[in-house]
Image: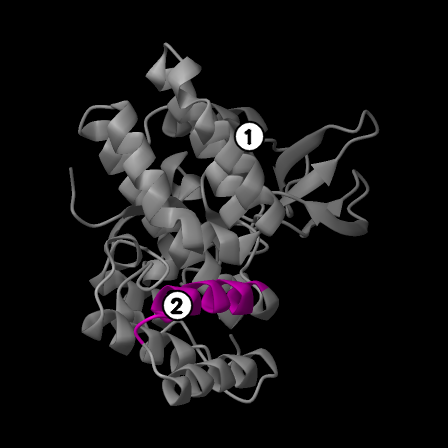
Amino acid sequence: MNSKPEIGISACLTGDTVRFDGGHKRMPFVMDELANWVTFRPVCPEMAVGLPSPRPALRLVKTPEHEIRLRFSSEPHEDITDKMQAFSDKYVNNIGSLSGFIVCAKSPSCGMERVRLYDEANQRGKKAGTGIFTATLMARYPWLPVEEDGRLHDPMLRENFVLRIYALHELNQVYASGLTRQSLLAFHSRYKLLLLAHHQAGYRELGRFVAHLHEWEDLGAFFTAYREKLMALLSHPATRRNHTNVLMHIQGYFREQLNARQRAELRNVIIEYRSGQLPILAPLTLLQHYLAEYPDDYLSIQKYFSPYPAPLRLRLPEH
């Protein structure tokens, strides 16, 4: 299996000149930073169904029967919905082990949300649609991390998306290596603190689910159910409050090794992070220093400390 996560992406975001106007929407973060750490699989659904670039603009049309159709803005009676749907169905059935997808916002083929709808009289309606291709993708793989370029400008959403693609990539590797109860339990153990930072109630619910692993005869069925629960939990961005609970929990592992001054210093750094005075890197760096000095088998495997490559610098002061 590829050692890097494989990510599907709307081709225009990579700089390919495939848009309706003959241009592109190259995204610097994607191509200048993330591209060093993942393998991209670009696709332009509109080009894939045989349209040229440039081409007349497409739009989503809501019919009186409440159907969503894909039509040209200049030729509203020319409908390519069936052609786009056929391509989308074929594509999503052959995506292999993709760990995520980045789609082009507002696109009638690729938009993830808030795509403008029109009526059959060409009147603008609500921004309430999803592109035909992306709607098919998300319906087929509800657990797959999918984000659009506009939302990835938000530091919290960006960090959460990258974290999820790396978690899914590691889970895919567990599957590819041959499922065993031991490998599934080991994976879950590595992610415990990270899950706790994202959703405390979900962490407890998933823990109870994993506790019944021994009752499942079909490990493939367990894997499918676990994957959906795991990715739903991680879709909740980690909060400062939850991070604080995790940091305090980790602090307890060094109770016996640290002296009173060190314990007080560590506690103050965590409290200052909680109040927004310090970034999360401050308590994390201090805890990792103590972990190096006083190794702990459980803490040393936790993905919480490094859920994705550090050079991506996604844990910013806002966290």
Decide whether the magenta segment is chiefly helix, strand or loop: helix
Per the rendering, the mark at residue 44 is none
Image quadrant occupied by the N terminus: top left
Stretch of the chain drawn in magenta: 242-257
Residue, x 55% and y 30% (percent of image)?
Answer: 139
Question: Is residue 131 rendered to the left or right of residue 16?
Answer: right
> Residue 22 placed where, x, y %?
41, 60
> Residue 168 placed where, x, y %?
36, 42
For label 2, the residue is 27
* Mark toward the start of the polypeptide (2 vs 1): 2
Q: Which amino acid type is shown beneath numbered disc 1?
A: Ala
Other residues around mark 2 within 10 Å, as few (<14) / some (14–19) / many (≥20): some
Nearer the viewer's eye, disc 2 or disc 1?
1
276 w.r.t. 107: above or below: below
> Residue 212 placed where, x, y %?
46, 22
For label 1, the residue is 139
Residue 6, by quadrant, is top left
Residue, x 22% and y 70% (percent of image)?
Answer: 294
